[in-house]
Image (cartoon, helix red, strand yellow):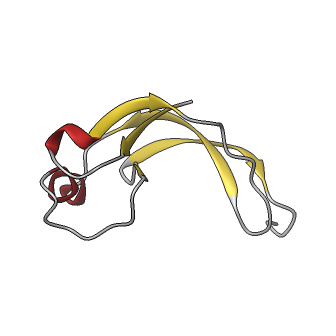
Amino acid sequence: MKALVKTKAGPDGMRCMEIPEPIPGGDNLKVKVFACGICGTDIHLLHDSYPCRLPVVRGLEFSGVVTEVGENVS
């Protein structure tokens, strides 16, 4: 799947790339995303003014439908 990933420090460290599609388990679920946007934190991560452990996948502002659920989700 495509994802926005901060892979290294600096503004050139944010890139759109293919990553493995997650498999939900436990209390997690998987959402098929139809639209997403940029969060204010993404701008801070771009400029290294917000702490994070690299690599980090971004994507807080989205909408879509649930396609799979973990075994603990009712």
Picture residue at 79% right of the left edge, 66% below the top: 73
Q: Which one is in front, 7 or 46?
A: 7
**Quadrant of the rendering where the N terminus is positioned:** top right
Position in image of residue 35 (x %, y %):
41, 33
Position in image of residue 55 (x %, y %):
42, 53
- Determine which quarter of the picture holds residue 41: bottom left
Q: Residue furthest right?
A: 71
Position in image of residue 50 (x %, y %):
20, 68
Picture residue at 13% right of the left edge, 65% below the top: 49
Q: Is residue 34 above or below residue 71?
A: above
Q: Which one is in front, 2 or 56?
A: 56
Q: Is residue 71 above or below residue 43?
A: below
Position in image of residue 17 (x %, y %):
44, 29
Picture residue at 75% right of the left edge, 47% below the top: 23
Task: Please give left or right for residue 69 compared with residue 19 in the image.
Answer: right
Picture residue at 64% right of the left edge, 36% below the top: 20
- Determine which quarter of the picture holds residue 26: bottom right
Q: Is residue 54 above or below residue 10?
A: below
Task: Please give left or right for residue 5 compared with residue 67 in the image.
Answer: left
**Quadrant of the rendering where the C terminus is positioned:** bottom right
Task: Please give left or right for residue 5 compared with residue 23 in the image.
Answer: left
Q: Is residue 32 above or below residue 50?
A: above
